[in-house]
Amino acid sequence: MKRFCATWIVSCIFFVTAIGQVTDYPEMRAKKIDPYFLWVSLNQTSNLIFPYEIKSVDRGSSSILAQKAKGAENVLQVKAAAVDFPETNLSVITADGRLYSFLLKYANEPSVLNFRFYKGEEDGKGVMLKGFEHDKEFYENSSLQVMEHRGFLRKRTSEQKVSLSLGSINMRENVMFFKLTVRNSSQISYTPDYVKFIVKDRKKAKKTAIQEKVLNPLFSTKHPTIDGDSSGSVVIVFPAFTIPRNQNLFIQVGELNGGRTLILKLRHRYLLRARSLISDVPFLRTSGTGIQ
């Protein structure tokens, strides 16, 4: 019996030591894979286009609907099954063995619906096209810095005791950050339903339709309800762009279940006033409720 106990103790010590060695072995340490951030809607379908055939899809919640597109084994169609569902996740594995991880939130009108991924990204993440070279942390940190800086522009419009102003346009790594502030001087709360950037011809030629283009942002901070006699700011991010002399940029903010629509018109030269966002400049604290 004593011999059995001694043997058992030695075996346990060996097992624990072995586990410690495996845990400390550098090649066995896990690497962090940051998820993509995806807004989905009840009435609009988001399309994820992968470089290889989709082999596995796992939804974190039944509030998400996901299916492979008919006739396209590399396209996943995603939409919400319920309004304002709690944040959840989605995991996709493709035929090349890569894992794509997403964090999903609800939006009435997602600013971007179609995403495409390249081959060859390390750690299972793809590379998004058209300005998605930066990760979520880049946009969040840069937007926070823009929010904290005092604006240098004074473009403003108002409608029924609610005003919209453009405080600044900043540049970092070929990306433009627009800081917008909504001031509610009434006692009726203002809830933004959408923010649109539209490029439109200044004048309509005879027998010619007006050319209009809606710009899709790369990232946006949130915009919750603005209570009476208060204000809030939002940062909208785009790939760097300019517009021709014969066109204007219209920034439009619509009220949810209301009639107070704010439209700010910018000429082409206004975009050229963008300033570089320097990371070592101290933050300047400003008042007002931030809109994420």
Image (tube, rainbow, N blue to C red):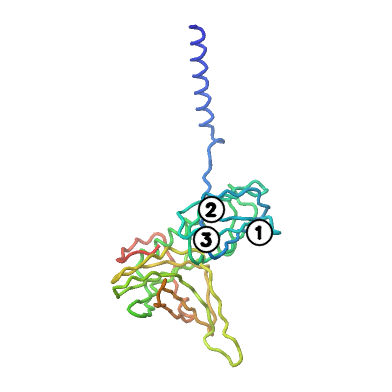
Q: Secondary structure at mark 3?
A: strand
Cα–Cα gap, marks 2 and 1: 18 Å
The mark nearer the N terminus, 1 or 3, is 3
Callout 1 environment at 10 Å: few (<14), some (14 to 19), or many (20+)?
some
Label for residue 40? 3
Tally of numbered tags? 3
User: Is residue 147 or residue 261 the one in the foreground?
Assistant: 261
- At 28% from the left and 71% from the top, the residue drawn is 229
What is the x, y in percent for residue 59? 55, 50
At x 54%, y 32%, the residue is 25
* Residue type, numbered disc 3: Val
Residue at the spot of label 1:
69
Query: In the image, residue 158 lies at what x, y percent?
Result: 36, 80
Q: Amino acid at mark 1?
A: Ala
Looking at marks 2 and 1 on the same chain, the residue that comes earlier in the sequence is marked by: 1
Q: Where residue 211 sits: x, y (%)?
A: 57, 82
Q: Give residue 102's mark.
A: 2
- Looking at the rendered structure, the kind of residue marked 2 is Phe
Element assignment for label 1: loop
